[in-house]
Amino acid sequence: YSQTQHMKRNTTSFSFPVIAFFISAMMGLLSCSTAQPVAVSKEDLTAAITADKWVFNAQRSDPPIGRSSFLSSGYEVRCSGDTAVFVLPYSGTMQAPARFPGGKGPLDFTSTDLTIKKVEKSPGKWIVTLKLNDQIDVISGTFTFFDNGKASLDVLFTNRTPIYFFGTVEPLK
């Protein structure tokens, strides 16, 4: 073999493992992507929203300052009529001293004194506002629900910048 033929031979044998590794890594990353909406009928979702028995699963946070970020599973808001349980991360700025009751973040709490306001803006789209009367730092959470399972949440604070979440909604089980 000449030196040129030898280099071509080594390049060919080297590129296959590299390409195989690259394809394997990409498939692994794709399998770790965020969860897809749960297949729920429009009727079941409408009934859950009407009955105030639903779960918002946050998949992405979008603070007004900084970068949006994809979230791991487990970040959610559960509404069961007279109770709302928030388990969400927060990133933003404060305009007053921080209060973290029980060592938790500002969006990790249970509210049992809340007012729920629902408006069907158009067929298949609802605006649901939770006014949280027993929370010092959080004024309200305004959800936008679609009958295809997509959803968003805007959280308004008394002393912090707001934060937005995007994800899915499904009936409470």
Image (spheres, helix red, strand yellow):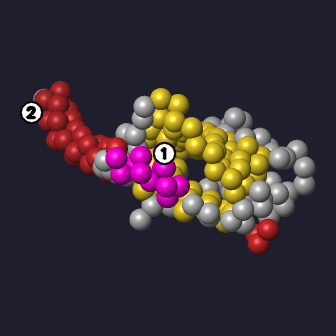
Name the residue: 69% across, 57% down: 114
Name the residue: 45% across, 61% down: 172
Percent of width and height locating residue 98: 85, 57
Answer with mark 1 or mark 2, whichever residue precedes in sequence: 2
Percent of width and height locating residue 64: 69, 35
Name the residue: 54% across, 62% down: 80
Q: Which numbered marker is on residue 64?
A: none
Residue 57 appearing in the image:
no
Residue 4, picture quadrant: top left
Name the residue: 45% across, 47% down: 168
Q: Name the residue under label 1.
A: 167
Q: Which amino acid does label 2 sit on?
A: Tyr
Residue 82 appearing in the image:
yes
Percent of width and height locating residue 135: 78, 59
Check disc 2 and report its element: helix, strand or loop: loop
Question: Which residue ends up furthest to the left in the rendered image?
Answer: 1
Q: Which amino acid does label 1 sit on?
A: Gly
Percent of width and height locating residue 65: 72, 36
Is 33 part of what is drawn in magenta? no
Nearer the camera: disc 1 or disc 2: 1
User: 79 or 31: nearer the eye?
Assistant: 79
Rendered view: 168 above or below 127: below
Check disc 1 and report its element: helix, strand or loop: strand
Q: Give the range drawn in magenta.
A: 43-53
Which image quadrant: the C terminus? bottom left
Q: Give the Cα distance between marks 1 and 2.
A: 60 Å
Q: Mark 2 points at which residue?
A: 1
User: 166 or 10: nearer the eye?
Assistant: 166
Mark 2 Cα-neighbour bin, 10 Å: few <14, some 14–19, many ≥20: few
Q: In this rendering, would 74 be left or right of 44?
A: right
Q: In this rendering, would 5 be left or right of 164?
A: left
